[in-house]
Amino acid sequence: MLITIIAWTMLIYSLIGLLVEFFFIFVGDTTKDRVKGFVDVVYFAFTIYFILRFIHG
């Protein structure tokens, strides 16, 4: 039960992080900032994928 609560908390955190970093791709000042935002979006997407597999699998 506790693991599931932690997974849901991480899912919410990852969704918020995904939205913020996706927005940051377009407003980053330098190419380095945009690439970092893109890498973070990919990281959050994989994190969300694995969390959903854990919750529903």
Image (cartoon, rainbow, N blue to C red):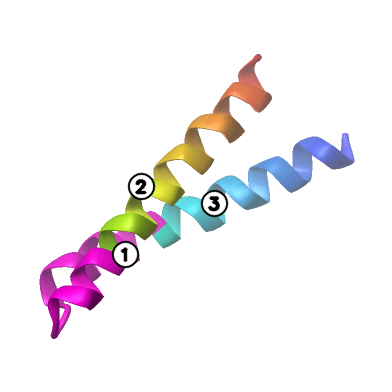
- Which badge, 3 or 2, comes first in the chain's sequence? 3
Residue named by callout 2: 42
Residue at which label 3 appears: 12
Q: Is residue 45 shown above or below 15?
A: above
Identify the magenta region: 18-36
Q: How many marks?
A: 3
| Residue 21, percent from left and from top | 31, 64
Farthest-out residue, right: 1
User: In the rendering, at what x and y percent does residue 23 appear?
Assistant: 21, 66
Q: What residue is at 33 percent from the left and 66 percent from the top? A: 20
Point out the frontmost of discs 3 and 2. Answer: 2
- Judged from the image, the secondary structure of the residue bearing numbered disc 3 is helix
Left or right placement of residue 41 versus residue 26 in this view: right
Residue 12 x/y as whole percent: 54, 51
Whole-angstrom CA distance, mark 3 to mark 1, is 14 Å
Q: Which residue is mark 1?
A: 21
Amino acid type at mark 1: Glu
Please name the amino acid that badge 2 sits on: Val
Report the amino acid beneath label 3.
Ile
Please state, as top left, top right, bottom left or bottom right, where the N terminus lies in the image.
top right
Which secondary structure, mark 2?
helix
Category of crowding for the residue at label 1, using alpha-carbon neighbours closer than 10 angstroms: few (below 14), some (14–19), many (at least 20): many
- For image coordinates 23% across by 71% down, the residue present is 24
Q: Is residue 56 above or below residue 7?
A: above
Q: Is residue 41 magenta?
A: no
Q: Badge 3: few (under 14), some or many (20 or more) residues near its Cα, within 10 Å?
A: few
